[in-house]
Image: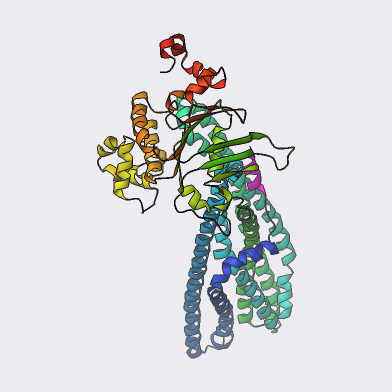
Amino acid sequence: MNYEAQEEKTLGKAYDSKLIKRLFIYILPFKYYVALALFLLIIGTLFHLAGPYLLKIAIDQYIEPKNFDGLQLIIILFGAVLLGQFFVRFLQMYLMEWIGQQIMYRLRIQIFSHLQKLPLSFFDKNPVGRLVTRVTTDVDTLNELFAGGFVAIFGDIFTLLGIVIVLLKMNWKLALVLFSTLPFLAYTTFFIRTRLRDGFREIRVRIAKINAFLQENITGMAIVQLFNREKKNFGQFDELNRSHLDAHLRTIFYFSLFFPMMQLFLSSASGIIIWYGGGQIIEKTLTFGALVAFIQYAQQFFRPLSDLAEKYNMMQAAMASSERIFTLLDEKITIKSPKDPKTIKQLKGNIHFKNVWFSYIGTNENDRHYVLKNISFNVQPGEKIAIVGATGAGKTSIINLLSRFYDVTKGEILVDGVNIKEFELTHLRRNIGIVLQDVFIFAGTIGDNIRLGDKIISEESIEKAAKDVHIHPYIASLPKRYNHPVTERGSTLSVGQKQLLSFARALAFDPAILILDEATSSVDSETELLIQDALRQLLKNRTSIIIAHRLSTIQNADRIIVLHKGEIREMGTHDELFEKDGIYRRLYELQYMEHVINPQCDKP
């Protein structure tokens, strides 16, 4: 949480050429729409500048000479200008918002697609909340740049340049009087903008902490309620929420100060114009209509200046968000399919670990902490092996390497004689079915969670898989059977039902290799017997690897591999290992001490 908050606290430069070039790639497909928006912006600026000038003409040429016939034409032109300004502004804003939403859509798709291709080692180091922020908050910040800032900045600049040209043309002396207020305006704007920037930064830090706390608290709600931590957690949330409120209130103070200050400068500038311009009217070097137009242009002059100050803060936030997004997109996809992958239409399931070493951490030999050391074993097609060992022995790491969630540090893994790095990832993983101890159930229906979106798997295959693992009677009792909705993470299912559902999921895909990682650890004994009965038929002619702490589930395995501190210490059948006075027998005796005491139950 602290790391994420610190990252959110970082602000970028208001303009970074490298980031702008990368952002421009997303604008490029919409270049004609952007060009149209800029054209509409220029037209809108001309309409904007025409209003005060028409007022000058109306006063000097028609109102003062009392020529009301000509005044009607000016009124019609003025109305046409307002109407044109309305339609041009509407089209320009709609167009930029549409472009911004299109870019947001494509950017989120790109980020999500990239996240799906990143190795699991990346997710081991990056919290979920941080990644969600990239796809949501940071992309929203860029939308403000594309939709409201990128083109609007040019609009403010065009407006300022147009006003300066018109004012200098009308009366350069009076224009210089107006421009004399700019240094004071610039200093005030810089002062308040700096305070607002610090306030926005603090708000981002506070909201990052609130999000992290909420995610942790809601996810662990059962523990919170079980250990009566509601009041303590409420106090922590109240403290976080209050600090967020305080940061907002400080920002509101400077916002409240900024706009009255701008109004003060505007009123002061108008007063100076009236004072100096009034003298010129008396001296007959300035017309009354020109003075009125000057006052209106002065009002228009300060508005884009304040907008540019606001756009500066927006550009800073956008640059920071884009840097974080591109840092994520630049994350290398280290595990990917080769350019010319090898394909075996029907894998037999021969697995060969050849001198495999593996470490989750460390980039060089001195920093590595090996969780697997010189692992070598061979699994024949259709053979059923079991892997046992104490917690941390490296059992799950073997599964992760076989599925290429991680790549081996040294050595190689072969499937049907081919290094798994030479297979296309989708082809390799399509032939490996895994049932994990921690089952993840998606929001959707029972059938969707078995099929996982694969339309090739028929309804009959789904039902057959459910029957084989004995969860069909439960599904059949539901009102909508296989179309029955499942809530997020399967909260309405028991732990055993979720494991049975994941078991049916693996079988429905009919993989060549089936892996059970503590798959029956949360299933009651009666249900486990039903699963074992199904497995005797289902695992025939299918290579299977079983990881289990409950040794009763693996006694019928063809071979048992005993891991200890990342090394293979023993290998053989249950009877062979039991005869040895080794690690396997000690594990067995710890679980079945009552059977060891009774010699007739040595092999339950």
Give left or right: position of 88 versus 197: left
- By secondary structure, the bulk of the magenta-drawn segment is best described as helix
Location of residue 365 by image quarter: top right
For the point 74% across and 74% down, the residue is 176
* Residue 48 lies in the magenta-colored region: no
Frontmost residue, 566 versus 55: 566
Frontmost residue, 398 versus 72: 398
**Percent from the top left, x then y, of residue 336?**
57, 53
For the point 37% across and 47% down, the residue is 451
Frontmost residue, 555 versus 172: 555
Give left or right: position of 487 versus 311: left
Quadrant of the image for the C terminus?
top left
Q: How is the image coloured?
A: rainbow
Q: How many marks?
A: 0
Asked if residue 435 shows in the view, the reply is no
Quadrant of the image for the N terminus?
top right
Does 333 appear above or below 36?
above
**Percent from the top left, x then y, of residue 327?**
64, 53
* Residue 10 lies in the magenta-colored region: yes
Frontmost residue, 210 versus 535: 535
**Percent from the top left, x then y, of residue 220?**
48, 32
Location of residue 488 by image quarter: top left
For the point 73% across and 42% down, the residue is 364
**Percent from the top left, x then y, of residue 255?**
61, 53
Look at the image and give the residue range highlighted in magenta: 1-13
Give left or right: position of 462 versus 519: left
Asked if residue 373 shows in the view, the reply is yes
Give left or right: position of 532 versus 259: left
Location of residue 18 by image quarter: bottom right
